């Protein structure tokens, strides 16, 4: 009995193995017939979810440039929409000496440099600043009310010139600063209020396809309005940064410039290639690099003004 029973069990094993094989094959076929989304393991979906690209802020919140501008307690933020307020800072009187202008160029802020023609360092500074990616404009000497006590320098436009003489004077000055993409007035409180003089100046600016920045050295100026009427990209100075060469005063004027930008959307500040100004702006570098405003070359604001005049 035992030997016969053992023989029957041994004979049954191949049948059992075959049945198990058939069942496994059927199960595998059913699994493969399921949609791929149903077969995917949960672990694989989680992994895929972690690797999906996510849209991130261009500046992480912890980055120094994402911090708001330090408030003096007197500045009110005005929401101008998605576009941050834009500020141009123009450095006048470049050309007398190299040191202050080069110090300012190293601040890492896109300043605009207004270069006087026919000075000792006019050509070297225009070349170096332009090569470094800084915007260069012509700082055109023009006759002030206090002339001759205050002398605007060589190549100045004066009230007694004929329009053809004015045009020739402007062309020579531009030829001495060929990198210039714009023009602003150096002094000029006597002639920027004279429509005849300004038309002769601005016709050359228009012919050269440049922009004009009215430094507003007099409240009687007609330069900005006339430039716009002539279809010239134009802007006007909002704040003088260093009409007093004192560091604390200049820092206060920088704050005033940023305040005006928040109120109006754009603002233009004018400073000078002076060691006190360079040191003060270096102290303000954190403010100027703030994400709440954007420092731009002056040509960008001229373009904005130009679109507004169309």
Image (cartoon, helix red, strand yellow):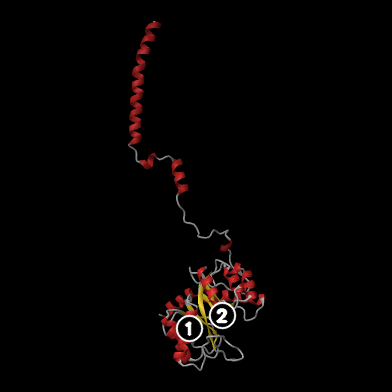
> Quadrant where the N terminus lies?
top left
| Quadrant hosting residue 33 | top left
Q: Position of residue 109 (x, y in %)?
A: 55, 68
The CA distance from mark 1 to mark 2 is: 13 Å
Residue that badge 2 annotates: 119
On the question of residue 85 being in view, the answer is no
The x, y position of residue 150, in whole percent, is 60, 89
Packing grade of label 2 (10 A; few <14, some 14-19, many >=20) is some
Judged from the image, the secondary structure of the residue bearing numbered disc 2 is loop
Tell me if residue 120 comes above or below residue 163 in the rendering: above
Identify the disc placed on residue 172: 1
Q: Compared to 98, does 166 lie above or below?
A: below
Residue at the image position 39 percent from the left and 6 percent from the top: 3
User: Which of the pair 12/64 is nearer the observer?
Assistant: 64
| Structural crowding at the residue carrying mark 1, measured as other residues with C-alpha within 10 Å and reported as few (<14), some (14–19) or many (≥20) | some
**In this rendering, is residue 38 above or below 273?**
above
Q: Nearer the viewer, residue 292 or 80?
A: 292
Q: Relative to residue 285, is residue 219 depicted above or below?
A: below
Is residue 247 or residue 43 the one in the foreground? 247
């Amino acid at each position: 009995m035992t030997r016969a029973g053992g023989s029957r069990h041994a004979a049954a094993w191949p049948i059992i193995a075959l049945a198990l094989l058939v069942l496994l094959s059927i199960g595998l076929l059913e699994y493969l017939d399921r949609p791929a989304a149903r077969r995917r393991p949960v672990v694989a979906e989680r992994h895929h979810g972690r690797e999906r690209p996510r849209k991130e802020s261009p500046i992480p919140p912890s980055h120094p440039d994402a911090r708001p501008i330090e408030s003096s307690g007197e500045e009110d933020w005005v929401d101008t929409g998605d576009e941050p307020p834009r500020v141009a800072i123009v450095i006048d009187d470049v050309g007398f000496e190299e040191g202050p202008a080069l110090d300012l160029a190293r601040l890492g802020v896109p300043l605009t440099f207004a270069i006087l023609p026919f000075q000792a360092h006019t050509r070297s500074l225009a070349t170096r600043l332009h090569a470094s990616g800084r915007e260069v404009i012509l700082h055109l000497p023009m006759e002030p009310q206090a002339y001759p006590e205050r002398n605007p320098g060589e190549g100045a436009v004066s009230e007694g010139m004929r329009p053809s003489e004015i045009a020739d004077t402007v062309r020579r000055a531009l030829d001495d600063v060929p990198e210039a993409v714009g023009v602003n007035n150096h002094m000029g409180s006597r002639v920027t209020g004279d429509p005849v003089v300004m038309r002769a100046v601005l016709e050359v600016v228009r012919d050269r396809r440049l922009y004009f920045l009215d430094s507003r050295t007099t409240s009687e100026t007609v330069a900005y309005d006339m430039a716009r009427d002539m279809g010239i990209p134009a802007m006007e100075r909002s704040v003088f940064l260093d009409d007093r060469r004192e560091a604390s005063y200049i820092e206060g004027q920088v704050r005033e410039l940023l305040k005006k930008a928040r109120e109006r959307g754009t603002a233009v500040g004018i400073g000078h290639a002076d060691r006190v100004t360079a040191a003060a702006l270096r102290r303000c570098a954190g403010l100027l690099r703030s994400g709440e405003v954007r420092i731009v070359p002056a040509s960008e604001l001229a373009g904005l003004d130009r679109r507004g005049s169309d």
